[in-house]
Amino acid sequence: MSAGVGDIGPATAVPARRFSGLPEWYATRQPLLLAVLLLGIVAVPQSSLALQRLVQNEPSWGPATLLVWGLYGVPLLAVILTVDYFEREPWWLIGFGLVWGGLVATGLALSANEAVQSLLTTVSGQDVAANWGAAVAGPTDEEILKGLGVVVAALLATRRMRSPVDGFILGAVVGLGFQVVEDIVYTANVMAVGQDPRSALVQMFVLRGIMGGLWSHAVYTGLFGLGLGYALTRVQWSLAARVLAAVGGFVAAWSLHFLWNSPLLVDSTDWRLVVVKGLPALLLLLALLHRAQRADSAVFLPALAAVANPMIATDGEVAALTDRRTRARARRDARATGGRAGVSAVRHLQRGQADMAVALATGDQAGARRASEEIAQARRRLGQLPQHPPVVGRGAGTWSAALGVVGLLVPIVGVAAVVLAVVGLVRARAVTAAHPGARVSLRLWLGLALGVLAVVLVVVALSSS
């Protein structure tokens, strides 16, 4: 027996068999996918049941509620996806984020919030639970559950996480899915207590869609995703700094969610709530996102600049791709010399250059060939455009025209429209004298005319009185 055992060494050990048809992508993520499946089996029936009850109890207004909130989420999703200018996320990943936020996180939160509310009532009493239950339960349960979905999405698509902006996209999409389904559930709850379905839908759309929609779950979870994106992509940082970035994102999401749900500062449902509690969250996200977008540019643009081919991208064009503001400035310059066709051509040129930058940075040769053709087509369009003389005073013309329109309702504003138009015309005259063929913007004349009309209204009203 001992001899037989000794004969079996490591060299003769039989390796564990693995199903040969199993894709490598799936094989390396089996435990994660099984955990996701388990959570989905537990959570999705709960969230689906809430939606099913709405349709059953309100055969007419139930489907209308689903449609209204579903359409509400479409433009928000479009805005979120445009944030990542360079690299658009795959649709399967966006779909996963929406499903996790809308069905998995929501279904688990329905039970978790009730448990925390019950625990808080037992520990601190009914009054404390009534005032602070939503502030404690909502941020704690919901931010953890949504954040878990962002982590899972990042693990499922490790090769797609190249910049902090990718983390924001995942977080905001998960938060948007949660936000839309939660709005449906709240609307259903108001209908269930006997309120007229139509007025309930309008009321909840105003309160949760308009007053709270722009600084709600998409913003909170987007902040966490941004922090997680820094933690996963800044490999040159120390481990402590990367952990701090992820924790900081979660703390920001939890704190802003807590502030919104709590009776602190403003305990009302009027516009003071928006200014004091909502707007700061959005401004914080926009400030951090601006920095992250510039960091996103730093990931891809060096590869484009290294080509050093002016037919692909000049130094000025590479600099213009840095952020949204510089890209828009380049398109405005194109409008001044080429009109709308110039704007369209420059937009296509920038899109092709961005695709080229991503293809070069990721080694995608097929993508580089497609981007090169797109750039060539855009340059041909630009070369075919007649070079119009510059439009003079366009900025002043826009403002004077806008003030002139307002002056028709508030006539005293017409004075500002006249002053701005006159200043613009004086400066435009100097430019046209130095640049033969330059044109004065028609908006200057329109602003002047509307401003004069508004002033006339003031004079007539004073003389009548």
Image (cartoon, grey):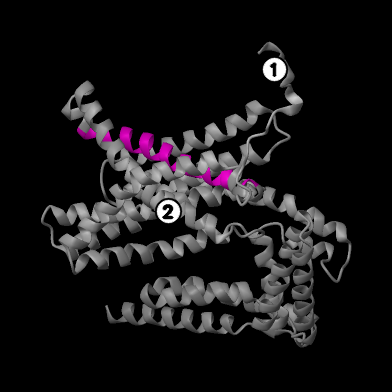
Which mark's residue is nearer the viewer, 2 or 1? 1
Question: Residue type at mark 1?
Answer: Gly
Q: Residue at x 73, y 24 (%)?
A: 10
Q: Label 2, on which residue?
A: 99
Q: Earlier in the sequence, mark 2 or mark 1?
A: 1
Question: Residue type at mark 2?
Answer: Val
Q: Residue at x 48, y 37 (%)?
A: 252
- Residue 246, position as x, y percentages in the image: 56, 35
- Residue 353, position as x, y percentages in the image: 75, 66
Q: Residue at x 43, y 43 (%)?
A: 146
User: Where 185 sits versus 75, above or below?
Assistant: above
| 139 is within the stretch colored magenta | yes
The residue closer to the viewer here, 269 or 175, is 175
From this viewpoint, is residue 151 visible?
Answer: no
**Callout 2 environment at 10 Å: few (<14), some (14 to 19), or many (20+)?**
many
Badge 2 marks a residue whose secondary structure is: helix
Q: Is residue 372 left or right of residue 275?
A: right
Badge 1 marks a residue whose secondary structure is: helix
- Residue 59, position as x, y percentages in the image: 18, 67
| 178 is within the stretch colored magenta | no
Q: How many marks?
A: 2
The quadrant in which residue 367 appears is bottom right
**Callout 1 environment at 10 Å: few (<14), some (14 to 19), or many (20+)?**
few
- Residue 299, position as x, y percentages in the image: 73, 50
Direction top: furthest residue: 2
User: Where 158 sits versus 422, above or below?
Assistant: above
Q: Is residue 185 left or right of residue 102?
A: left
Q: Which residues are magenta?
A: 130-158
Return the mark for residue 4: 1
Q: Quadrant of the N terminus?
A: top right
